[in-house]
Image: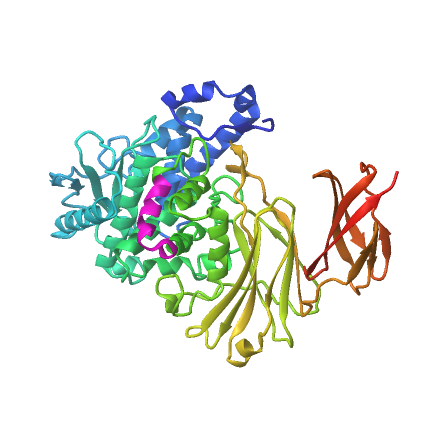
């Protein structure tokens, strides 16, 4: 608990009572300094984004303001006042000059659920009928998200209605944002929306104005509901879920696709598979820096879409359950997903992430579990794995995956991979016949919940290549294990299985290892170096184990201590570099 680790997170006032009970190391000077630096970086980032600097997706302001709100207690003096001002509404006198209305607002247009605020003149004034349109569209969103999908009603800010402010945001290239009112102390917090006043296509790359209004309201109102569940959930959970919501409500609007392919403003999800599912780093180069990989958390929507497809009618309830089970004060959002998946009848997040990673390899085929497969970009391959060639070595963070092309070869294809002991991993071969957008897919997936060596095999790959298809090797670090603490220096949880060394090779070797066992003498007749694990059982219990390797053609005596006179059972499990295995067993009569 040293090195500046603190309990997640940084809440104001009331919840600090909880932190007061934390161990002394949680309040160390180093931890406080790291928390202050993160808060200052959040302030700088929010200021930049609201001024239109560093905007890459048009949706970044919401998460920047949420992080600022949850870290505000670490700011002092003028910085604290600046943060409060940035979180203020356009009608508040202390809001920054360029963020507040410059003329008095007209009477808001309200119904039982929303109040739409606007002004009659100046740059923020909307066109005639815009407020009424926004109110109607907001109610359509509410009817779907709270009604059809059954999400909890938003927290009350005093009058039982959610406030929507129409404001000129196109100049900053922002579509809109949700923000909590400052200095709330609970994990369930009320919030308000600010959206652009006209969604002029000229300011948004030609996007249709009504479509922009609809997906922005669906997305940002989802944040309002999320804040009612847990304002301390992880950034990727907020954004992937909000994009899922907009796509779920408006499947004909394909705005979400822009987060998947590379753009002039940075890489898309399809070329960022080396990053963890949970990746979010707004300050990669220090305070105030903005990440060119910002699209990652929005592109993570494909994970949500996969779960919805896999669980069918239970998919919508699963998405909601990830918020009902969220408690970002005590554990990361991966735990909420794991619990929701298990409640829906699944095996857990590791198993589903392994299946998801294999499905992504050929997600453009018509039978794909993802929406509009023909519109999806091909996911980046990191290179080729050649049969009989050199082994590949990867370093993989938690909940990440890697794809490799397997060039055409004769004979079977066997993909062997070795993961560190205890790390949940998976390996797969995904073979497609026919064209990329019209073929059929065969997947051989092996999950390795405890790490170690494993393999997947396609015995007759020739027809896949002959039809114009391909074979892809998939490696998955499916591990979501973590420590109990949030690290303010890293701005993340303490993930237990980052930077895992994974080795892999492709071969045509599907033969079992050749070896024999006579007494305690193990003899190799193989041309490859073999690994072995030997165990000796006596009187119904294992009394000793031995691990090691044996060179081609060598003989090795297995020395296992602890046995006594009488019968014993020796079992040896062998594996070759292609993960072919063999079991040898002998019953021995041990002398004095």
Rendered position, 120 above or below 34: below
Q: Quadrant of the N terminus?
A: top right
Where is residue 176 drawn, in percent x and y? Answer: 29, 47
Where is residue 86 drawn, in percent x and y? Answer: 33, 35
**Residue 313 forms part of the magenta stretch:** yes
Q: Residue furthest bottom?
A: 466
Q: Residue furthest right?
A: 592
Residue toward you, 104 or 471: 471
Residue toward you, 357 or 39: 357
Where is residue 514 drawn, in percent x and y? Answer: 77, 63
The residues colored magenta run: 308-323
- Residue at 42% across, 73% down: 437
Rendered position, 413 above or below 274: below
Residue toward you, 581 or 92: 581
- Residue at 26% across, 57% down: 250
Left or right: residue 77 versus residue 143 is right
Is residue 162 visible from the viewing direction of this image?
A: yes
Residue toward you, 12 or 75: 12
Q: Quadrant of the C terminus?
A: top right
Is residue 268 visible from the viewing direction of this image?
A: no
Where is residue 408 drawn, in percent x and y? Answer: 61, 75
**Residue 249 forms part of the magenta stretch:** no
Rendered position, 563 above or below 532: above
Residue 24: image quadrant is top right
Left or right: residue 26 versus residue 529 is left
| Magenta stretch, overall SS | helix
């Amino acid at each position: 608990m040293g090195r500046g680790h603190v309990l997640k997170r940084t809440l104001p006032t009331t919840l600090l009572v909880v932190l007061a009970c934390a161990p002394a190391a949680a309040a160390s000077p180093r931890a406080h300094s790291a928390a202050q630096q993160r808060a200052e970086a959040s302030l700088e980032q929010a200021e930049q984004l609201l001024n239109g600097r560093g905007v890459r997706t048009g949706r970044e302001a919401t998460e920047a303001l949420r992080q600022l709100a949850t870290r505000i207690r670490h700011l002092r003096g003028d910085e604290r006042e600046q943060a409060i001002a940035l979180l203020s509404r356009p009608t508040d006198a202390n809001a920054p000059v360029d963020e507040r209305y410059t003329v008095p607002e007209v009477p808001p247009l309200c119904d039982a659920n929303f109040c739409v605020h606007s002004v009659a003149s100046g740059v923020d004034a909307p066109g005639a009928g815009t407020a009424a349109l926004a109110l109607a569209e907001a109610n359509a969103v509410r009817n779907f998200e709270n009604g059809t999908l059954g999400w909890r009603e938003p927290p009350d800010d005093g009058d039982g209605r959610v406030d929507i402010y129409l404001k000129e945001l196109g100049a900053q290239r922002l579509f809109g944002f949700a923000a909590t009112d400052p200095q709330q102390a609970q994990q369930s917090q009320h919030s308000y929306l600010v959206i652009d006043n006209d969604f002029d296509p000229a300011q948004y790359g030609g996007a249709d104005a009504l479509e922009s209004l609809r997906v922005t309201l669906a997305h940002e109102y989802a944040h309002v509901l999320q804040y009612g569940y847990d304002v301390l959930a992880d950034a990727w959970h907020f954004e992937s879920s909000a994009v899922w919501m907009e796509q779920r409500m408006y499947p004909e609007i394909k705005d979400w696709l822009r987060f998947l392919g590379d753009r002039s403003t940075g890489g898309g999800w399809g070329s960022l598979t080396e990053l963890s599912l949970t990746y979010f780093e707004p300050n990669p180069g220090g305070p105030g820096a903005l990440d060119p990989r910002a699209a990652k958390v929005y592109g993570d929507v494909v994970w949500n879409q996969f779960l919805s497809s896999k669980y069918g009618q239970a998919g919508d309830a699963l998405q909601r359950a990830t918020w009902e089970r969220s408690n970002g004060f005590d554990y990361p959002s991966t735990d909420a997903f794991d619990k929701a998946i298990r409640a829906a009848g699944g095996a857990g997040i590791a198993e589903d992430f392994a299946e998801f990673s294999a499905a992504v390899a050929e997600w453009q085929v018509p039978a794909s579990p993802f929406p509009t497969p023909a519109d999806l970009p091909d996911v980046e391959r990191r290179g080729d794995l050649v049969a009989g060639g050199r082994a590949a070595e990867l370093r993989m963070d938690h909940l990440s995956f890697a794809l490799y092309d397997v060039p055409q070869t004769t004979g079977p294809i066997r993909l062997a991979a070795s993961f560190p002991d205890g790390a949940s991993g998976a390996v797969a071969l995904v073979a497609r016949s026919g064209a990329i957008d019209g073929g059929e897919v065969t997947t051989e997936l092996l999950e390795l919940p405890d790490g170690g060596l494993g393999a997947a095999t396609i015995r007759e790959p020739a027809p896949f290549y002959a039809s114009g298809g391909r074979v892809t090797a998939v490696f998955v670090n499916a591990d979501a294990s973590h420590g109990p603490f949030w690290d303010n220096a890293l701005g993340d949880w303490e993930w237990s299985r980052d930077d895992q060394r994974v080795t892999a090779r492709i071969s045509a070797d599907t033969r079992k290892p050749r070896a024999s066992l006579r007494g305690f003498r193990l003899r190799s007749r193989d041309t490859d170096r073999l690994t072995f694990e030997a165990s000796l059982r006596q009187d119904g219990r294992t009394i000793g184990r031995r691990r090691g390797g044996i060179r081609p053609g060598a003989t090795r005596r297995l020395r296992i201590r602890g046995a006594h006179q009488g019968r014993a059972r020796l079992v040896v499990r062998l594996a070759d570099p292609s993960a072919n295995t063999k079991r040898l067993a002998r019953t021995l009569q041990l002398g004095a």
